[in-house]
Amino acid sequence: MVSARGSLLLGVLVACNVLLVQCALNLNVNEKDFQNRYYNGKALDVPLGEEGTEELHGHWVDQALSGLMAAVATDRAEKIAKRDADELYSCSKKAKDIHQHAKCVAKSLAVPEHKEAKVAHVEAAKPTEDEKVEWVSGMAVARARRSAGPIRVVSKDSYSLPDDHEKSPFMMVAKHLTKSLRKIKKKKGEESWHQTLHKIKELNVQNKEEEKKRDALKKRLRAMIEAMPENVDTTQKQQAIKQIEELEGHKNMTEAAEAKKEAIKVPMQLIRDAVKIGLQLAGEDVSNFENKTIKMVSPRFLSVMPDDNTDDIVRLISPSLFSLHEDGDAVENVLSLPGLFKRLNVGGQEEWMDFIIEMSGVGDAVDTMLKKEDPKTKRAQELLGNNGQPLYFTKKNVTELYGEDETKKVETFEQLDKSYSKDQISDLDKRGFTFLSNNQLDMVYGDESPYKSNNLLEGFKNISKEKQLDFIIENIHALAALQPDSYRQNRTKRAIVGAPFINTPLTGAGLALSQPVTLSPLVLSPITLSPAVLGPITLSPWVFIPLVLSPRVLSPLILSPLVGSPIILSPLVLHPLILVPGVMNPFVLSPFVLSPFILSPQALTPVILSPFALSPLILSPMVLSPLILSPFVLSPIILSPQTLFAVVLSPYALSPLIESKLIASEVVLSPSWLS
């Protein structure tokens, strides 16, 4: 029952744009050399092997599940009390796997929603600028102000438009200059100044919409990072943080710029205080003054667009002069070029405005902005390798690499992406996930889809719209109730091959060391609090690797020399050392059982306070390797001569010397039985 639910959860019931799944290869090679090495002429082809591929798929599944749960948790955090939300984020940070993360989210889902008390504030209505207040029977009555002047209707028998011969010389000069200028610029067409300003307004609206989307995305990314476990792929977290900084237009200010900013901070504050006092004396409203922008003796000339949020700007001798538009406040409108032309009553104001716009280069700047690459195209250019090949899948390279069958999968999701409704896009922006409609489910799992699955299609369609979110929540509870890693079936044993550890402390790395390690030298990388089971180490020398509080079971060392690697408080069980020569590897408070030394000569390797049993020395000569306060039993020394050897306060039994000479050796206060 649980496996069926798990398979349903992995289906595409939810279209989630929260997570940008990515793969990071931690290779100590130059990026350019790496790309040249694995570039096959069409794409980067990195051989992962069967186990590596399965591990990568498992990583993607973990990331996708964690991302979906983080999206649900973020949505939930907005509906519960702050202390409960903080507890949810703290728990998610500490989660070490999907199972623990699901427990955190499931716990928050059981918390009742928090509703803050709302206090209604009723403010007295104020008359607008277009209203006139009159007192009638002792009450103030606002009356709308009528038009400033009477409306005159002009009637004529016929109307005619002037042709070029009837136009004024003033108008003809402007038109000729505009044509000449456009000819010099090699521009085709005759775009009016009204059209240019309309384009600017459209760009302004688009920029504001993009800014709103960026703000929403920044908020969601921050919440997602807070709601995900700390051990989530650090590359992904760094990419998310980098994305936030890019969205914010993050600038790395130099120390000199910071110092300059501090230097002008004091006089600027004095100016602000003086302006504030002056406004107060004049009876002006100074509420929220600290957040307003002050413009002092800073007139604007030939402005293209009016100021936004004029309520947040305080102007002192800073008018807008000769603006190219007719918007803005009364003064700006009167002093604008279109307004001046109308008031001067000279012919050809439209032609002169066309000339001024063309001469100023505003139209060229707008055209340049419109031709700029959109963010998706720019991002695609950044994700190209040294040979110009995309570092991501496209329909073209998928077709070349994997054929038409895989191309159909890409086309299916392209079609799905184009089919999202406004409500679904809104859900993706606000919550990070949305639910597919029946038509979209047919698109993904229907007869025409490469993912055809009648069982999944029927199962998803049977879930009513009201129960869709409950279905996800139910699966999160089921995932939380499972044993760790039981949700992933047929999991194979992984291995570390050809991955040296240099100056990399391994703390709490028991899981990583509980797998075969081959051809992976360890240098200056202490192992602490990392118990290991079934983690054989082969052809992997240790150089200055202290093993502290890290017991090992069924984890033999084979063909792996040890140098300066003490074993402290780390019991060994079924841990033979085979062909492991060593120097300066003391055993301290580390008992060992069934851990023989075979063909493993040692020097300067004392055994202190470390009793051992069933751990014979076979063909393993030793020099300066005494046994101190370390009783032992059933551990014969066979064909292993001992030089400068001592047994001190270490009773032993059933441990005879067999063909093993003692040279310059001592036995002190160490009784023996049947040896």
Image (cartoon, rainbow, N blue to C red):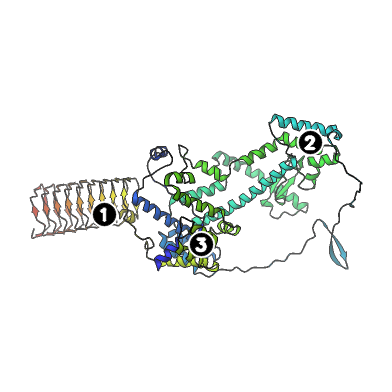
Q: CA distance from mark 3 to mark 1?
A: 45 Å
Residue drawn where x is 74% and y is 30% of the image: 180
Instruction: Using the image, tell me which numbered label, if any, was put on residue 72.
Output: 3
Residue drawn where x is 86% and y is 39% of the image: 345
Mark 2: which secondary structure?
A: helix
Residue 284 horizontal/vertical position (percent): 76, 53
Mark 3: which secondary structure?
A: helix
- Between circles 3 and 1, the one closer to the viewer is 3
Q: Is residue 659 left or right of residue 581?
A: left
Instruction: Using the image, tell me which numbered label, if any, was put on residue 342.
Output: none
452 vs 34: above or below: below
Residue 666 horizontal/vertical position (percent): 11, 51
The image quarter containing residue 189 is top right
Q: Quadrant of the N terminus?
A: bottom left
Q: Earlier in the sequence, mark 3 or mark 1?
A: 3
Label 1 is placed on what type of residue? Ile
Residue drawn where x is 55% and y is 57% of the image: 428
Residue 93 horizontal/vertical position (percent): 45, 58
Instruction: Using the image, tell me which numbered label, if any, was put on residue 352.
Output: 2
- Residue beneath label 1, please? 568
630 vs 323: above or below: below
- Between circles 2 and 1, the one closer to the viewer is 2
Label 2 is placed on what type of residue? Trp
The reply to whether residue 394 is in sight is no
Q: Earlier in the sequence, mark 3 or mark 2?
A: 3
Label 3 is placed on what type of residue? Val
Neighbor class of circle 1 (other Cα within 10 Å; few <14, some 14-19, many 20+) is many
